[in-house]
Image (cartoon, rainbow, N blue to C red):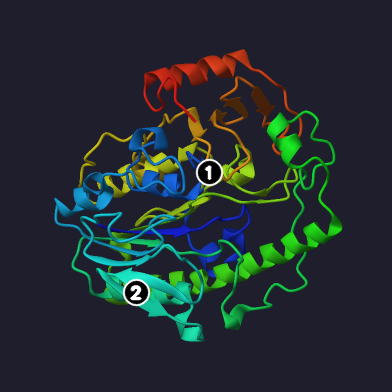
Amino acid sequence: MNVVLIVADDLMVDGFSRMPYLSSLDTVDFPNSFLCTPLCTPSRYTLLTGMYPSRHGVLGNSSNEIDHDKLLPVALSRVGVTSAIYGKLDNDFREGHHTLQGWSDTAIFESGRDYYDYTLRENGVDVGYGSTDADYSTDVLCGKAVDFVTNASEPFFCYLPVYAPHGVAEPATRHAGYFDGVTPDRRANHNEADISDKPQWLQDTYPETLTAGKVTTRDNRRRDGWECLLALDEGIEDIITALTNRGILDETVIIFMGDNGESFMEHRIIGKAHPYEEAIFADVRVLWPGVAGRTDTSLVSSIDIAPTVAKALGARLLRAPDGMDLGPLVRQEVSNWRTDIVIEHITDTALDCPTFTALRTADAKLVSYYDGTQESYDLSADPYELANLGANSTLAARLALMETGGPLPETFTA
């Protein structure tokens, strides 16, 4: 078996649905898939460990405190798997801050990540890219992935964490304007009129509804983001064509997801790193050999990705993960699955939302902030989190039990 893991950066809730080729694939889709933390760098190291950030140690975007000799590619290398990474390892990659291990081929964004005019660290050598159409980063990275899956010895693991649709989204020239005139869908919590029931941090950050000008700006940013994803969509088609031409598509697991979400004015919020659905949604989709596509509403977490990759490739992670192998779930070989997951966020000084842990079940959510404040939602009746029900002793007891039992320390310092 081979595995390809494709990760979009700051994926909006409707991002994958705007990618026609990906949408046409016979994938197993997990609409209840979530990130264990809504922030780029901690989330990315969870993908390579299967651990919560409070266990793997990377808590903020600028942290480099991670043992690379314990990451997924090292475990894979021990059983003869060839591994490659093309794209964004974390938010602050610099040679010397990281001692990469286990990768057979690398092309990693240096600290300056972008669509044009960026530098990739390619197998220890800095390679600069310019501003021509041929330099468009998604195309460059996808091209490297195509070459790898075409030529790499089997079994292999290809990790493709592209930059799209992050930041000031800049689509490839050929896609610019593709979604002009398309009005984004308005979720019921869009630019929420009354947030008096929400925690104080949100009321302080967004004391008034957003102006019409800001709404227009964010709508344009969303369309640009969709257009950025079209290059990734084409790259996915090229990768699958390469696997097909080599005759190994039916021997390859392909996982698609986002590293964290992004809010487009839901609850007035612009950005991420908060506990609401738009920031924690992962949109995990899996193409698994011999498995017909379907929608599976089981609760899936980003902590499950590394165990899934390791198991599919016959490896054992070097540190016990918090997550579980998705393979049996995808193949419908299990009758019981988890009933709740934990989300955590340890405050990054650049962000407004304070430290929290949260419990997400199939139909409810509790958020417990570091200062003791709680908010909760009945997601079956209120999927857009419009009515904060406040403290919930039942969910709080379950969260405390899960924290004491393993994934989170009993106390931590922001």
Identity, as a three-letter code, of the amino acid under mark 2: Lys
Tell whether 195 sits left or right of 284. Answer: right
Tell whether 92 sits left or right of 182. Answer: left
> Which residue is pictured at 43% across the width and 31% down the height?
337
Residue 350 percent across, percent down from the top left = 57, 45
Q: In the rendered structure, find residue 293 and report the number of the disc placed on it.
A: none
Using the image, determine if residue 378 lies above or below residue 274: above
Residue 173 figure quarter: bottom right
Residue 288 figure quarter: bottom left
Quadrant where the N terminus is found in the figure: bottom left
Which residue, given by chain and number where applicable, does mark 2 sit on? Answer: 144
Residue 17 figure quarter: bottom right
Q: Residues within 10 Å of mark 1 (few under 14, many from 20)?
A: many
Label 1 sits on a secondary structure element that is loop
Residue 104 percent across, percent down from the top left = 21, 64
Identity, as a three-letter code, of the amino acid under mark 1: Pro
> Which residue is pictured at 59% across the width and 45% down the height?
279
Residue 302 percent across, percent down from the top left = 43, 43
Question: Does residue 411 appear anywhere in the picture?
Answer: yes
Residue 202 percent across, percent down from the top left = 71, 36
Q: Residues within 10 Å of mark 2 (few under 14, many from 20)?
A: many
Marks 1 & 2, CB-CB < 8 Å contact: no
Using the image, determine if residue 41 lies above or below residue 319: below
Distance CA(mark 1)–CA(mark 2): 28 Å
Q: In the rendered structure, find residue 38 and report the number of the disc placed on it.
A: 1
Counting the numbered discs, the total is: 2
In this rendering, which labeled residue sits more in front, label 1 or label 2? 1
Seen from the viewer's position, the closer of residues 336 and 84 is 84
